[in-house]
Amino acid sequence: MKQTPNETPKKHRGLWWKILLPILILVFLAANFVPLNNWFIEMPGSAEPLAQYVKVDGKRDTAKGSFSLTTVGIAQATAMQLLLSKTRPYEDIVSRNDVMGGEDNATFDRVQQYYMTSAINNAIAVAYKAAHEQYTIHYLGIYVLAVESKSAFAGKLQVGDTITKVNGRHFNASTGYINYIRQHKVGDTVTLTYTRGSKTLTASGKLYRLAQTKKPGIGITLTDRTKVTTKIPVSANVAQIGGPSAGLMFSLQIYDQLTGSKLRQGRHIAGTGEIAPDGTVGQIGGPEKKVYIAAKEGATIFFAPHTKVTKAIKKLDPGFEDNYAVAKKAAKDSHLKITVVPVEKFGDAVKYLQTH
């Protein structure tokens, strides 16, 4: 029996669909679920009320309103997420190196926890000082967060080591170590005393000229390692959240509980900013993402670090953008119902809440 002219095309169409459909399904699944190892999406994260993390004198804060830290979310990208990120507000595609600086996942997470520990200790000190409550800062040294490949101490120091002395000298702030080293010349040999776990070790190496400051240095990224003891007990457990940028909001939460000032008055207040022991509020990353998520989660006030942009700052960092200016622009561009407030010192935030 002969085939009619239109039978062969129908058979071919059915065969092609049997081949193409599984391929299309596999492509769809891969695009949605297979992570791209070298690419991440940075996005607005969350606004986390701090009352759930903080206890003062063994008690949690149950008053109305909230002080919330804000986060930037980081997710390993898939091909589909890369495409969708172009249509979503404040989502950026970043490389693994941009996020982690060459560190592996475990080291990156550990560094973020060191930053958070330092931020909480500074926050406690600032809050207790402002509340005129008794506290003592024990300065242990400086955490090593990264070692530059050009450093004479590469292969000697490790992430998580704590430097306690330089040439036998101990200082009570990282600035003391930095200023002491800058009194030397490029090529001078210095000896570091440091702890690793329960061991005390030493290592020697030559100073070299740092690329950014043009000053002699040992070539590490660092943060202060402190321990704070207080007469009125305080604890802060932030689970898996890392980084230094929650310092300001922790200070406000602890201060409000210590003093019973009722600064919130039922309001939902969010913000960001690294806090120094003297109460200075430092710049952080992703202010536009943080103000966006704060507004979406119900905050009506957002504290943002403010630094006056000087010629000296622009010379040192030509791409510098003030957090407050960036956050304020994001709030305006996205029509967010939130008031962005500039803060340079912890006291600026307290004064604003007392007077508004």
Image (spheres, helix red, strand yellow):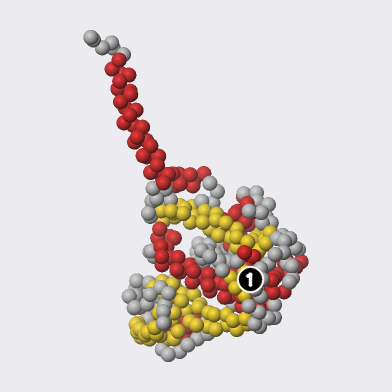
Q: Residue at x 43, y 53 (%)?
A: 76
Quarter of the figure with residue 260: bottom right
> Viewed as shown, does residue 222 lie left or right of 233?
left
Percent x, y of residue 72: 53, 58
Quarter of the figure with residue 237: bottom right
Q: What residue type is labelled 1?
A: Lys
Q: In this view, does 341 lie above or below 169?
A: above
Q: Which residue is drawn at 28% across and 12% down?
A: 5
Q: Which residue lies furthest to the left in this view?
A: 1
Q: Which residue lies furthest to the top in this view?
A: 1
Q: Can residue 248 be seen in this view?
A: no
In terms of depth relative to the viewer, which is nearer, 119 or 349? 119
Q: Is residue 163 visible?
A: yes
> Viewed as shown, does residue 355 lie left or right of 290?
right
| Local crowd size for mark 1, using a 10 Å CA cut-off: few (<14), some (14–19), many (≥20) | some
Q: Residue at x 70, y 77 (%)?
A: 131
Q: Which residue in the protein does label 1 denote?
A: 55
Q: Is residue 97 above or below residue 200?
A: above
> Viewed as shown, does residue 59 lie left or right of 196?
right
Percent x, y of residue 17: 34, 28
In terms of depth relative to the viewer, which is nearer, 85 or 27? 27
Percent x, y of residue 259: 72, 74
